Amino acid sequence: MAQNHGNKGDIGLSDLLTSLSDLPWQNEQQAQAIFHALGFNWRNAPPERIESNKAKKIFDRNHYRQPASTRSQANHAKGFSAQPPPKEPVELPQTILTTELIPLSTSTASPERPAWLDGENVFLNPEPSPIKLARANLFPTLTHRGILSAALRVRKPGKEADIPRIVQQVIKGQIPKDIPTRDCISLERGCQLLLDFSDSMVPFWEDLSALANQLQNLLGTERVNIFEFDQDPAASKHWDESGNAKDWQVDLTRPILIASDMGISGQRTKWPLTEVWRGFIQQCTEKKLPLIVLLPWQETHWPEQIGNHPVLIHWNPHTTATMIKKLVGAGHQVKQ
């Protein structure tokens, strides 16, 4: 029997042999299989297969379970499949046709030489088209909408009631015939655009075209009447697609925007206005027409002006909408 040790969980060799002798095997084959399953050899002989009614398997500890083999499938792209097998070749007929090959003649008549080939021909070398340099607009793309909106905004009666004004009239004992409304800001009037294409504005001709495109994109083509002039804004003309000229006329329902240097050419400082510009400004002042002038030169070159009319704006990338709002105020007043 096994000796007593401190660890009660150990099984001695004698206990194992006693247990094996008590197993109820029926024959020597069963005993051999049991010993082999426990890792012992039975008289140095491998165990034989034991037939039983139940489908059982006896495994050795030296064996391990093999993973189930899975058949790998080829990864095909979705929507594609393998090509079909080639068709069986068609059998050729047994009959042979008799044919004769006719050789071509090597002597060919030379064509007549064209007369223009012997003339004095000049080969033109293709000239590369000149690269058009990028040009930044005086009113940048990111800010021109805010700048032009602040310069051309017009006041018109809105739909909201003017409560402070109604209260004032009630306190004074006046009964208003119509409910007064608050003014709102709008760009629906559009504008008249007068562009100066005089000799002193030659460096800015491309900027004049860019300004016209910016205004049409902002207000719409039908709300911008474009006129051109040379030194005298009162003699502005509009040219239609047919080439017919139309003289400029006063429009009391929309402001006037002029892009010009007013003839200064950036050479003198604080020079007086010419008679042409004085007459045009006076005409707009008498008819209460909003007049805004875009000057490409700095303020030190601006001419002396009379009062606050017209509104002079520096046509420059550094101009902001906030600067213009301070000059224009709540908006222009035009005839409704």
Image (cartoon, helix red, strand yellow):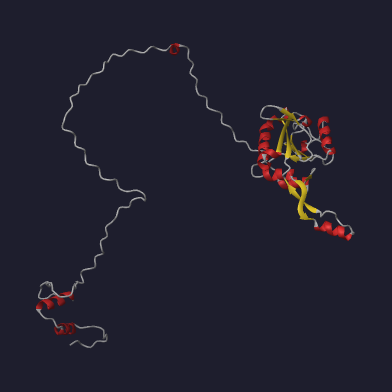
Classify the position of the N terminus by image quarter: bottom left
Residue 319 showing in the rendered view: no
In the image, 260: left or right of 213? right
The residue closer to the viewer here, 86 or 214, is 86
> Residue at the location (72% across, 28% down)?
245
- Quadrant hosting residue 294: top right
The residue closer to the viewer here, 292 or 319, is 292
In the image, 45: left or right of 264? left
- Quadrant hosting residue 259: top right
In the image, 30: left or right of 132? left
Classify the position of the C terminus by image quarter: top right
Q: Position of residue 51 (x, y in %)?
A: 13, 74
Residue 134 showing in the rendered view: yes
Q: Position of residue 145 (x, y in %)?
A: 67, 44
The residue closer to the viewer here, 252 or 200, is 252
How many discs appear?
A: 0
The residue closer to the viewer here, 26 or 140, is 26
Task: Work out whether 132 lies above or below 53.
Answer: above
Task: Work out whether 15 lies above or below 49.
Answer: below
> Residue at the location (50% across, 20% down)?
124
Task: Work out whether 146 lies above or below 29.
Answer: above
Q: Position of residue 79 (x, y in %)?
A: 36, 49
Toward the right, the furthest residue is 173
Q: Position of residue 160 (x, y in %)?
A: 76, 55
- Quadrant hosting residue 188: top right
